[in-house]
Amino acid sequence: MTISPTIDAPASEPHAPAQIESLKVGFVSLGCPKNLVDSEVMMGLLNRGGASITPRAEDADILVVNTCSFIDSAKQESVDAILEMAQHKSSRGGRAQRLIVAGCLVERYRDQIRANIPEVDAVVGTGELESILQAAGLAQPPANPLFPILTSAPAQPVPIERHASSVLQHSHPSAASPQRSYETAAKPPAPTRESHPATPSRPEGDLREQQGRFSRDAWDGAASTLPTFLYSHHTPRILATPRASAYIKIAEGCDHPCSFCIIPQLRGKFRSRPLADIVAEAQSLIAQGVREITLIGQDTTCYGEDLPPSIPLHPGSDSDFSASAAEVSSLASPAAPGNLSPQGLRRPDLADLLDALAPLPGLHWLRFLYAYPNKITSRLLKTIARHHTIAKYLDVPLQHASAGVLRRMKRGGSADRFLQIISQARELVPNLVLRTTFIVGFPGETEADFQELCSFVAAARIDWLGVFSYSDEEGAGAFALDDKVPRRTIESRRRRLMKLQQKISKRARKQWVGRKLEILVEGESDETELLWQGRSMEQAPEIDGKILISDFGPHETLVPGAFYRARITASHDFDLVATILE
């Protein structure tokens, strides 16, 4: 559970009427980084509307719980958080006047939330983030908003002034801040204002819709239309991540047919943000002191498949690299000429986006999360290898290794095919770090299927691995499957697989001892104030192991959000210990 930091509205921003200027809003954000970005957007909208954000639930006039509904445990955590925040309402002796529930749980249980938790005053679905202002009782944005939202409806250009950043000024470290004093990176120029038209769907998404993939007819109270919200770099955000790090959501929704998953019904069809819009947001974030950017989406490797062609194809060139990084970067500029002919153009893809972002001045680390295995091309891998700012890191949720289980999951693939993909990735990207997740206990999973998964894990030598117990979700295709695995068997298999991975991870971590590497210092350890903690480029925020810092070396103290050279001195099952060198 995360409640956002205290942030006051900057004096230069327009405010709502005086009577609501003093409203304080507390946020609880649950679930994945994609949900966290939604929370940051809602906090930005509320702040721009005249409210301030407080980290203390007992001080809040309005409480917002942004929920997750991916699996049973996430739903229960969301319900528990709603009930906990309800205890702070004035009707129960607290201060809060309003309780708002947002996110995926709303898409699934809109009517049930209202009926069963009367303390809830309003609900905001995943496609309704801009309605958080109305839900909070603040004035709606003007007809020509300062923060246009990209939706599936045709958008008209809005001739308005560009604000300094999509991230509000209170996220900006002052010139005298420890981070700015420590680093020497140059501040890039602020991006210019541009409106972007909406984009069509992927053909795969249209086909899935015809096949009923996005149907929510059985969900009582669900909105009849799918979410179409897609924020732009003009949308205000308040960062809830540590100062040096930020997420950028490059796409929303999902078109894949995975039978265990209801995310397409919760978040709608896959839709990409324009490449230039993402680059502009990255420039704004870097100007605010962000040095590590993590690109996220339900499947980042589908990026651009719904965008109009804009990248030139060179006659006779290798189709794997049809445009140079410099050409992609120039096209990413909002000021780039728009008179290119449709002939000889192709759609931008994730490799193009990485090529445009990696050279940005001031950016230190860049990574992307959640790749689909059959979308990992040699072109993408070569792009990762080519840029020193891109983490040699690949997060590919494989879900299983048994061909039979994968077929029932509607994923496809096999252990042999996945080993080929991993082998090629390691060949093209030296020192590549791999992360994946698996689901155990899927309907019909036999002991032989599970043993095949264990054999694959042993052979693949995955660096970071997560295991989910299968959760039977109404609305998912797997809900109707027979041969359900007993819960006790599922939990036993999860423990056995994690024990196997623990041994693999322990051996892998020992190989790090003695290495010298750059680490991003985050601050005091979560476990003890006697140690500090940080991460290497090969560790994604929040989900991978940590580097515990036991010796500051030549420094009296360290600066959170700054990068240091360090040497690994010891290893544990998942975490490492380091000494600062310089």
Image (spheres, helix red, strand yellow):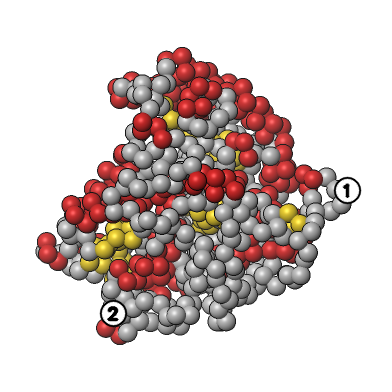
Residue 172 % position (x, y)? 50, 70
Q: In the image as oriented, which residue stretches furthest toward the front? A: 210
Residue 162 placement: quadrant = bottom right
Residue furthest to the top: 448
Please tell me how crowded label 2 is: few (under 14), some (14-19), or many (20+) other residues with Cα within 10 Å: some
Name which residue lies at 26% across and 67% down.
62
Q: CA distance from mark 1 to mark 2?
A: 63 Å
Quadrant of res 73: top left
- From this view, report whether residue 487 is shown above or below residue 108: above
Amino acid bearing label 1: Gly
The residue carrying pointer 1 sits among few (fewer than 14), some (14 to 19) or many (20 or more) residues within 10 Å by Cα, namely: few
Q: Which of 406/295 is in front?
A: 406
Q: Nearer the viewer, mark 1 or mark 2?
A: 1
Front residue of 209 and 497: 209
Number of labels in the image equals 2
Which badge, 1 or 2, is on the more N-terminal residue?
2
Residue at 63% x, 51% y is 305
Residue at label 1? 316
Residue at 62% from the left image edge and 36% from the top image edge: 374
Front-most of residues 531 and 299: 299
Q: Secondary structure at mark 2?
A: helix
Label 1: which secondary element: loop
Q: Which mark is residue 20?
A: 2
Q: Is residue 474 left or right of residue 276?
A: left
Q: Are marks 1 and 2 in contact (CB under 8 Å)?
A: no
Q: Is residue 422 positioned above or below 360 on the image? A: above
Please state which amino acid type lies under the numbered disc 2.
Ile
Residue 225 percent across, percent down from the top left: 41, 57
Residue 136 placement, left or right of 165: left
